[in-house]
Image (cartoon, rainbow, N blue to C red):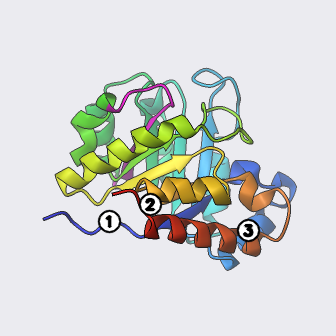
């Protein structure tokens, strides 16, 4: 019998926050109902942008007790797993397209005591992650090409996300199906309708308006999407 799915969770992406007032943004998002925080780590090689390293993760850890979801958009994740976990990362998400053998990366994250996730770019087929589904706490289906915030959601990834959900359910896994990229009120509803449970939301939280109100509208959307989920 399948295990119960995890609850629907919103994870504001701090890459979209005002770095000059990061502590205030974290506090406002937490007060507004954020369930976790998402941190995008970019190395300028795996993706063409550079973001931040363990020091920033540690600074965020000092300001919140919420889970930290660390998205390693880096070419050699195995070199940095320990550093990001020790900095405060609760979930370490590596890309299946990066260097390193996925099974070994999963074992190493487990040995560190962290949760482990695997991410797929929009053009990476579901088959790449299937051998590891039973070992993962999260499967991240990217709804944009990784590297820059503010991109538009790609609806063509929804069938792929739905297929990941189906396969997780067949295994009886309660792993999160996460979606990241262009998550707005409308697209969050669509993502929830195909079985997503973990929603990385950046500009829709931080780029204008009241953070708590933005989160409330996003939560209403994902609840509505889950209620009308595609079966």
Q: Residue at x 56, y 60 (%)?
A: 189
Q: Which residue is mark 1?
A: 5
Q: Is residue 198 magenta?
A: no
- Residue tagged 2: 197
Q: Position of residue 227 (x, y in %)?
A: 45, 70
Q: Residue at x 33, y 35 (%)?
A: 105
Label whose residue precedes the other's in the sequence (1 or 3):
1
Q: Position of residue 133 (x, y in %)?
A: 26, 43
Q: Which residues are magenta?
A: 113-126
Q: Nearer the viewer, residue 55 or 219?
A: 219
Residue at (54% x, 65% y) in the render: 222
Task: Please name the residue that numbered disc 3 is placed on.
Answer: 214
User: Which SS class for mark 2?
Assistant: loop
Quadrant containing the N terminus is bottom left
Which is nearer the N-term, disc 2 or disc 3? 2
Q: Can the viewer see residue 90 in this picture?
A: no
Give coordinates of residue 173: x percent, y percent. 24, 56
Q: Work out whether residue 97 or residue 142 is closer to the camera in this orientation and state it.
A: 142
């Amino acid at each position: 019998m399948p295990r119960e799915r995890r609850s629907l969770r919103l994870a504001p992406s701090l890459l979209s926050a005002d770095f000059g007032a990061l502590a205030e943004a974290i506090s406002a998002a937490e007060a507004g109902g954020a369930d976790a925080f998402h941190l995008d780590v970019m190395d300028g090689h795996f993706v063409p942008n550079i973001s931040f390293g363990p020091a920033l993760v540690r600074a965020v850890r000092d300001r919140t007790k919420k889970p930290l979801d660390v998205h390693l958009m880096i070419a050699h994740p195995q070199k940095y797993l320990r550093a990001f976990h020790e900095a405060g990362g609760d979930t370490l998400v590596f890309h299946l397209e990066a260097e390193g053998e996925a099974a070994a990366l999963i074992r190493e994250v487990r040995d560190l005591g962290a949760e482990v996730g695997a991410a797929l770019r929009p053009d990476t087929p579901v088959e790449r992650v299937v051998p590891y589904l039973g070992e993962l706490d999260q499967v991240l289906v990217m709804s944009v090409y990784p590297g820059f915030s503010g991109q538009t959601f790609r609806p063509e990834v929804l069938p792929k996300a739905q297929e990941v959900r189906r396969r997780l359910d067949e295994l009886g896994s309660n792993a999160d199906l996460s979606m990241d990229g262009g998550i707005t009120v409308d697209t969050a509803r669509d993502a929830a309708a195909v079985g997503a449970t973990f929603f990385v939301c950046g500009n829709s939280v931080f780029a204008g308006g009241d953070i708590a109100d933005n989160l409330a509208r996003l939560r209403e959307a994902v609840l509505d999407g889950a209620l009308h989920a595609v079966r």
